[in-house]
Image (cartoon, rainbow, N blue to C red):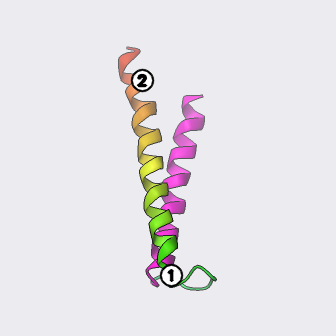
Amino acid sequence: MKTFLTVVGVMAILMGVIWILQGINILGGSSMTGQTQWAVNGCISVIIGIGLLAFTYRQRIFKR
């Protein structure tokens, strides 16, 4: 389960970074390019991913 949460957290961060770059018009090639809503969605995704990683690693520390 911890491996799964780690993978989901990393994927959420990577997806969020891509959305941010598309939203602020750095990474082109889709309908999301230049749409600031996608930059906001990307920030939310990155925060969720960091939260998942923090939750996962916090659980590992306290189980020792």
Q: Main secondary structure of the magenta part?
A: helix
**What residue type is disc 1 on?**
Leu
- Most extreme residue toward the front, as rendered? 37
**Residue at numbered disc 1:** 27
- Most extreme residue toward the top, as rendered? 64
Q: Secondary structure at mark 1?
A: loop
Q: Position of residue 50 (x, y in %)?
A: 41, 46
Q: How far apart in space, not on screen, are marks 1 and 2 (Cα)?
A: 36 Å
The residue sitting at 41% across, 31% down in the picture is 57
Q: Secondary structure at mark 2?
A: helix
**Above or below, comparing residue 45 to residue 9 in the picture:** below
Q: Position of residue 58 (x, y in %)?
A: 38, 28
Q: Position of residue 26 (x, y in %)?
A: 45, 83
**What residue type is disc 2 on?**
Arg
The residue sitting at 49% across, 56% down in the picture is 45
**Above or below, comparing residue 28 to residue 2 in the picture:** below
**Above or below, comparing residue 33 to residue 51 in the picture:** below
**Nearest the camera: 13 or 41?**
41
**Residue at numbered disc 2:** 60
Q: Earlier in the sequence, mark 1 or mark 2?
A: 1
Q: Classify the position of the C terminus by image quarter.
A: top left
**Image check: 22 left or right of 43?**
right
Q: What range is drawn magenta here?
A: 1-25
